[in-house]
Image: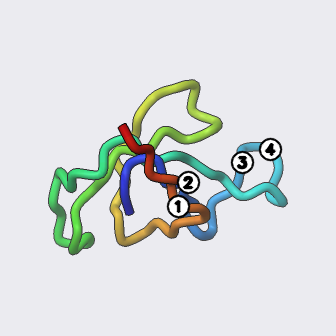
Amino acid sequence: MKAGDLIHMPGQYCPGDDSVPSVGIVIDDVPQFRHKHSKRGRIGVMWADNWGNVDYEPADWLEVVSEAIPVEA
């Protein structure tokens, strides 16, 4: 996973509608906050339904929906 990737946490859905999977974008791909339940640490994700806040989620719990397109300078 890298910054800009669109991700999903399997089993999680948008509040109020269990038919719409929650999605977010990776903001910070440098693993932080290592924990015994996450081999790769947590990465910063801005969830579509979280009003612009960044949550640090266990990278092992996430799957990439769409990879970011590299931008050349």
Q: Give the residue furthest to the front.
A: 73
Q: Label 3 near label 2: C-beta < 8 Å?
A: no
- The quarter holding residue 1 reads bottom left
Give the labeled residue for mark 2: 6
Give the labeled residue for mark 3: 14
Q: Which of labels 2 and 3 is toward the front?
A: 2
The colour scheme is: rainbow
Q: Is residue 58 left or right of residue 31?
A: right
Circle 2 SS class: strand
Q: Is residue 34 left or right of residue 8?
A: left
Q: Label 4 near label 3: C-beta < 8 Å?
A: yes
- The front one of 71 and 57 is 71
Point 26% across, 70% down: residue: 38
Give the labeled residue for mark 4: 16
In the rendered image, the quadrant that contains the C terminus is: top left
Which numbered tag is attached to residue 67?
Answer: 1
Question: Distance from label 4 to label 1 (Cα)?
Answer: 27 Å
Circle 3 SS class: loop
Query: Could you tell me the amino acid type at mark 1?
Result: Glu
